[in-house]
Structure formats: C-alpha cells, structure tokens
Amino acid sequence: MKKEKREPRIPSLAEACIALILVCAAIVTGLQLGIGSQMALFLGACTAIAAALYFRVPWEQIQGEFLRVISDSLIPLIILMVVGIMVGAWIIGGTVPSLMYFGLKLCSPYIVLPLTFVLCAVMSVFTGTSFGSIATMGLALTGVAMGIGIPLPVVAGAVISGAYFGDKLSPMSDSTNLASAMTGANLYEHIGSMMYTTLPATLICLILYAVLGFKFGANAMDDSNIILMMDTLEGTFHISLVAIVPAVLMLVVSVLKIPAILGLSICALFSIVFAMIMQGITFTEVMSACFSGYVSETGVALVDTILTRGGLTSMMNTVALVMIAGIMGGALNASGVMKVFEEKILLKMVKSVKSLVITTMLYSYFILIISGSQPLGVVMGGATFKDMYKKMDVHEKVLSRALADTSTLAAPLVPWSVAAAYAMGVLGVGLEYIPYAFLCFLVPIFTVISAVTGFGMWRCDGSKIQKRVKV
C-alpha cells in the first residue's frame, strides 16, 4: 500500500515564536561560548532547519529556499572576493602605503577624525562598496590616526560611519540597488528620499567627530611615531603620488557607472600590473599577495599591523558567514515561521502612516538580528510591506528608505553580522568601535522624525504628506 505524503503543517503563533526564540538562543549561546560568529550562526541555521523539518517541510523545499536566499547574495560575495584581491595588490603596489604616508604628512591631529569620515564617505560613494572603502581609504586613515595617538575604536567608528554613508547612497552600491528593486522604487528617487534622513545625521556626525578630534588632538602628538612610520613606509615602498593612480581609477570607473563587479575587476587587474611596474616586483609576488594577503615584516608594529592584510583568503570567513546566514534565513522562510509571525503580529501593529514606518524599521532590525544578514532584512521587508504601503497611499521610496536606514546601517552594529565581522577583521578592532559609529545611530532617529512630522514623506502620486498625518 502506497504511503500518503504528509503535507507541511502551518505553525501556530506560539510555535512560530518558540522557533524564533530557539534560533536566537542558539546564536547567542554560540557567541557566549566563544566559538565565533560563523559557528554561532551555524547553530542558528541548524535550529531553523530542525524547526522546518518539525513542521513537515520537505527537505527539497528547505534546500531550494535557502539556495534562493544565498543566490541573492552572490553578487556581494563576488565583489567581496575581488576586493580582497585588489587590497592585496594595493598594499604591495604601494597605493595604501602612499595614502598612509601623505596622510601622516599632511593631516592635522585636530581634523583627522572628521577627515576620516569624509574621505571614507567619498570613497564609498564613488565605489559603491563599504567593504572596499573600509579596506582601502579606511585602512590607510586608521594608520594615520593611530600614529597621531587616537584610540583605534574611535577612528574605526569614523571609518565605518563614512563607509556606510556611501553604501546606502551610492548608485553603484548593491545595497542601494537592492532596496530600490525590492520595493519598486526608482533608484534615483530612492537615493533622493534618503537625503532627508542622511544629510542632517551627517552634519551631526561631523560635529561629533570634530569635538573628539579636538579632544585627542589636544594631547601631546607622538611625533616620533609618525616620523618612524613615514621613514619605514618610504624605506619599504616606492612612495609617490603616482602610486595612488589605482585609487583614482576606481573613482573613474565609478563615475562612468561601470557595473560593480566589472569595474572592481578592471581595477584589480590594473592594480596587479601597476604594482609590478611601480614597485619592481615579480608577477608571482603580486599574485601571492592577492591570494593570501601581504605580510609586512618591517619590524615596526604600527606599520606591520596595518599592512599585513588583504588577499582572497582573507575574505573567506566573511563568505562563509554570508552563506550560513542564507541557509538560516531560507529555512525560516520555508518553515512558515516568518510568515506566521508577520501576519499575526507584525502587520497587526500597523495603524497609521507613522506606525507603518516604525513597524517597518523594527521588522528590518529583527530580521538583521536574527540572521546577521544585511540584505535579508531589505529583501523580506520589501516583500512584507510593499502592498501595505500602497494600501495606505505611501510612496515606495519611503519604504525603500526605511529599509536602507535600518538594515544597511545597523549591519555593522550586530556582532555576528557579515559587516561587523568584516570591519573587525580588516581594521583589527573589536566591538569597542560600535559606540563611535555615530551615523548608524543617528540616521534612524531622523527616519522616525520624518515619519512623525510628515517631512520627507510622500503619497503614491508623489505629493507630499503634510504634518497632519494622524497616529
């Protein structure tokens, strides 16, 4: 007698909440045990898969769902690997050392923090990648600030704030394009709407970093460290303005709006050839640095700490984190846990335009905290709230902004996220940087202010929503 196929069972609200609590508990327990972000998230993914199997979801369906989620992250993963290759070439080719050298030579201790924020923001706007900005301009300026005597967590906060300014505003950014695509908002309308929340937050950031800069700049500047670093860089690399050409090329390909993977690949290949010509090294030496990273052995700790990094292999931990996050998010989707939670709790919280935006933000934060995946909050948030925004006559660019202002900017604040793991790995800093990543905290505040006041809010036909919006 043929055995009947058992249909998947829709979880009850209580079961959905218990499943989510167990997933969170697995992740937090793993982090507390010190097994690392990847393995902590792996425990969460296993728990999510177990929940899906408990609700009788066929394995083929679970696997298909997490493969679909992972496929959404393939472009960022490829960009990540190309950036690793390029960073190795930039260091051995003298680009990053030259940026450090001229920064040490020209930068005043009083302005180094706001300058770090601005330069990382400019780099990320033109390149469309926060990761690339952190690993290049951010890395160089970290060396400058450390030479002046500014604590690493403080300068790392300024680097991350600047890098994520561009990650959410650049038309080259995958995050920006993803938010636009998932909500149906026009790309440049989406960017324009974010100006209402990002620009005032940026102004406050500059003031805060300037205040901190004056605080640390008032301390005795360690000239001996700066001279030692500059002499070491000059003695190890061929330092010149010409060495910065690969960075300029990256800006050019960005202005020309060459697709991110193609543009970064062109820059990486050029940087490899440029390094051989500029530093007089062999093809094998450059390719070794591109694969396994550059190893600085100058004997000067500050220089060696900053320059020993890069390479394709340096990105593999982050690649693993992204893929495991995709498995966990896909399993939660397949089990129906997220759908039940959305329909029976989340959407019932929406009573007005203001509560719609705030609920969107809370949902985005929730997905990010659960999964550690920056794009997942945008993808699921767009799918969950798109019809609700239309129903309440709120323009889709308000939805896209709410998702970008939360999921994108909060990513480096979640310890087990890809963004946090990457920033800590590249800059060599711990979670102490989080309180100094001011932009990540300030922008969402202005998102809420916009929702409450109606300033920077639009109806579906493009007309402005006035202050009379009721709660």
Image (cartoon, helix red, strand yellow):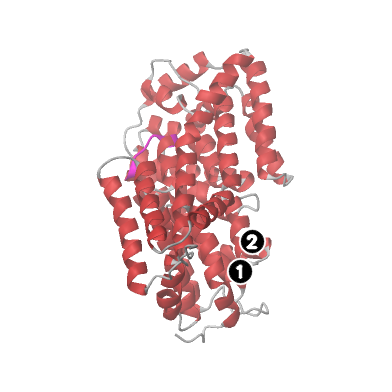
* Label 2 or label 1, whichever comes before in sequence order: 2
Secondary structure of the residue carrying numbered label 1: helix
Residue 466 percent coordinates (x, y) = 56, 83
Instruction: Please give left or right for residue 268 compared with residue 159 in the image.
Output: right
- Count of numbered circles in the view: 2
Residue 229 percent coordinates (x, y) = 43, 22
Residue located 60% across and 63% down the image: 182
Which of these two is toward me, 257 or 65? Answer: 65
Instruction: Please give left or right for residue 178 compared with residue 37 in the image.
Output: right
Secondary structure of the residue carrying numbered label 2: helix
Q: Nearer the viewer, mark 2 or mark 1?
A: 2
Amino acid type, residue under disc 2 in the picture: Ala
Vertical arrangement, residue 463 with respect to residue 312, above or below = below
Which of these two is toward me, 376 or 424? Answer: 376
- Residue receiving disc 1: 397
Residue extending furthest toward the right: 256
Q: Kindly report the distance in space between the C-alpha atoms of the residues bearing marks 2 and 1.
A: 11 Å
Q: Which mark is residue 11?
A: none
Which of these two is toward me, 375 or 228? Answer: 375
Instruction: Please give left or right for residue 365 compared with residue 241 in the image.
Output: left
Amino acid type, residue under disc 1 in the picture: Lys
Residue located 61% across and 22% down the image: 240
Q: Which mark is residue 181?
A: 2
Which of these two is toward me, 26 or 34? Answer: 26
Q: Is residue 85 magenta?
A: no
Q: Residues within 10 Å of mark 1 (few under 14, many from 20)?
A: many
* Residue 202 appears in the figure: no
Residue 419 percent coordinates (x, y) = 46, 46
Residue located 63% across and 15% down the image: 283
Q: Which residues are magenta?
A: 426-431
